[in-house]
Amino acid sequence: MKTLEYYMSLPYRAEIIPDPAEGGFVLRFPDLQGCLTQGETMEAVLRNAADAKETWLRAALEDGLRIPEPDSPEDYSGQFKLRLPKSLHRSLALHAREEGISMNQYCLYLLSRNDALCQRQ
């Protein structure tokens, strides 16, 4: 059985978001659903983060809930296979050729651009 100390030592990713409605900042741990805290300043929200994580983990352990472990960049190869309609394949290849780049580079550009747009929402 894994302990509180074990989970506290793991490098969970934290996201800090300005809170325009209330002021200050909100910090959440995306891998620990519902684990968040707030603070009036960046320093305050960072101070509160460890306490929020510990409280969340302690409650999950007491309730016997499954606690997800953070993933790491080593968990991803950077490659995946994608099947697409022939018409889309042709369109992507033609646009890549117009740009003077490989289709792989063109698709990476499109995915990166769309991912950046989604993260702003």
Image: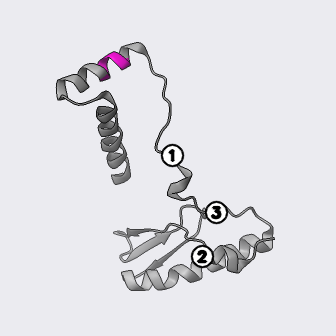
Residue 102 at what x, y percent from top left?
A: 28, 29
Identify which residue is drawn at 22% across, 23% down: 97
Q: Per the image, is 7 magenta?
A: no
Q: State the predominant SS element of the stretch in magenta.
A: helix
Element class at badge 1 = loop
Identify which residue is drawn at 60% across, 64% down: 32
Residue 17 at what x, y percent from top left?
A: 39, 67
As measured in the structure, the alpha-carbon distance from the residue carrying label 2 to the one carrying label 3 is 13 Å
Residue 111 at what x, y percent from top left?
A: 36, 39
- In the rendered structure, the answer to whether residue 71 lies left or right of residue 2 reads left
Q: Nearer the viewer, mark 2 or mark 1?
A: 1
As measured in the structure, the alpha-carbon distance from the residue carrying label 1 to the one carrying label 3 is 19 Å
Task: Name which quarter of the figure residue 72 lies in.
Answer: bottom right
**Between residues 58 and 102, which one lies in front from this camera angle?**
102
Marked residue nearer the N-terminal end (1 or 3): 3
- Vertical relation: 120 (above or below) 33: above
Tell me the amino acid under the disc marked 1. Ser
Marked residue nearer the N-terminal end (2 or 1): 2
Residue 80 at what x, y percent from top left?
A: 50, 36
In the picture, which quadrant includes the N terminus? bottom right
As measured in the structure, the alpha-carbon distance from the residue carrying label 2 to the one carrying label 1 is 29 Å
- Vertical relation: 51 (above or below) 26: below
Tell me the amino acid under the disc marked 2. Lys
Identify which residue is drawn at 34% across, 32% down: 104
Q: Nearer the viewer, mark 1 or mark 3?
A: 1
Query: Circle 3 is placed at which residue position?
Result: 69
**Between residues 57 and 36, which one lies in front from this camera angle?**
57
Query: Circle 2 is placed at which residue position?
Result: 53
Magenta segment: 88-92
* Label disc, if present, on residue 77 of the rendered structure: 1
- Vertical relation: 111 (above or below) 45: above
Element class at badge 2 = helix
